[in-house]
Amino acid sequence: MQDEKYDLYRKIEPVSRVLRALGVPPPEAFIPTPAEILDDLGVPTIEEILPAIKEEIRSKIRGMK
């Protein structure tokens, strides 16, 4: 039963090797990443908003001293 699960992958492997040798990018290369989708939608990513949040926290801590 376990071998049946991997039979499909064994059949695809020779094709995958040929495509890789020809320099054809894998299908994953065409799927946008979540960051790319957020950028297309105009939603700021955590990397963009984190510095402002850190600075706000630091300024409040400095104000408490």
Image (cartoon, rainbow, N blue to C red):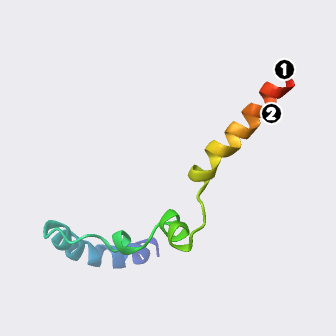
- Quick check: 53 left or right of 64? left
What is the residue that sits farthest to the left in this orientation?
A: 22
**Residue 60 horizontal/vertical position (percent):** 80, 33
Find residue 24 and report its image quarter. bottom left
Distance from label 1 to label 2 (Cα)?
9 Å
Residue 65 marker = 1
Q: Residue at x 30, y 73 (%)?
A: 10
**Residue 6 horizontal/vertical position (percent):** 39, 73
Residue under pointer 2: 60
> Regarding mark 1 in the picture, which secondary structure is present there?
loop
Q: Residue at x 63, y 51 (%)?
A: 49
**Residue 55 horizontal/vertical position (percent):** 68, 37
Q: Residue at x 16, y 72 (%)?
A: 18
Q: Which residue is at the front of the view, 23 or 64?
A: 64
Q: Amino acid at mark 2?
A: Lys
Residue 14 marker = none
**Residue 37 horizontal/vertical position (percent):** 51, 71
- Quick check: 12 left or right of 34? left
Answer with mark 1 or mark 2, whichever residue precedes in sequence: 2
